[in-house]
Each structure stands twice: as C-alpha cells, then as structure tokens.
Image: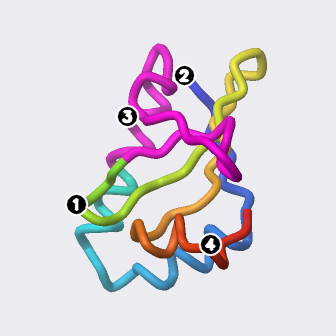
Amino acid sequence: MWQIDSNSHHLEKKLKKFKSDKTVIDGFKRTIAELAESDDPRKFGEMKHGKFRYCYAIHITKSHSLLYRVFIDEQIIQLIDLDDHKNLYGRDNRI
C-alpha cells in the first residue's frame, strides 16, 4: 500500500473550495483510495511535461484533475494540486 502525502496548504485550500461540490470530493476520495491500493499508481495517470514534468494527472470528474508525483523507492504519492483544467494549466499557475 502506498503512503499518501497531502501535506500541502495549497491542496487543503483547494479541498475547502470544492467542499460543497460532492462530485469533486467523492471523486477525489475514490481516486486517492485507488492510487493508495494500486500496484503502480503511475499507470492510472497521464505523465505531464513542462512545468509539471515528473507529475501525473488523473481526471476525477469530466473537468477536474488531480496532479500527483510518485516516489517509487519510498512508496509515497505526493498530491500536488486539484482543480479544473484551465486553472491547472493556465499561464499564471505555479507549483
């Protein structure tokens, strides 16, 4: 089982933003459980390029994605960001 690292103030703020959106929250919880129990969480997401290289993205709803990194040796999945596509990949975005 993989350890989930969600120690990100940025991600906590995003989850509060979506707390009234049951679809996003349920999708987030389901996705986290699937990643944690998987043999290789890299196979669930799509590897990203550019400023998000070394990250993977997985859709949790039609328009919302979760960005995460995988540290194989430590068996850790680090959650990076959760948002809709235009906010994640917009020009003003920073990790």
Which kind of residue does numbered mark 1 sit on? Lys
Q: Residue at x 59, y 45 (%)?
A: 68
Q: Check disc 1 and report its element: helix, strand or loop.
A: loop
Q: Is residue 26 left or right of residue 54?
A: left
Which kind of residue does numbered mark 3 sit on? Glu
Quarter-of-image position of residue 45: top left
Rendered view: 44 above or below 18: above
Mark 4 — residue?
Answer: 12
Q: Nearer the viewer, mark 3 or mark 1?
A: 1
Q: Residue at x 65, y 72 (%)?
A: 93
Q: Which mark is residue 1?
A: 2
Q: Residue at x 68, y 46 (%)?
A: 5
Q: Earlier in the sequence, mark 3 or mark 4?
A: 4
How far is the residue under mark 2 from the one under mark 1? 27 Å
Mark 3 — residue?
Answer: 34
Quarter-of-image position of residue 21: bottom left
Q: Check disc 2 and report its element: helix, strand or loop.
A: loop
Mark 1 — residue?
Answer: 62
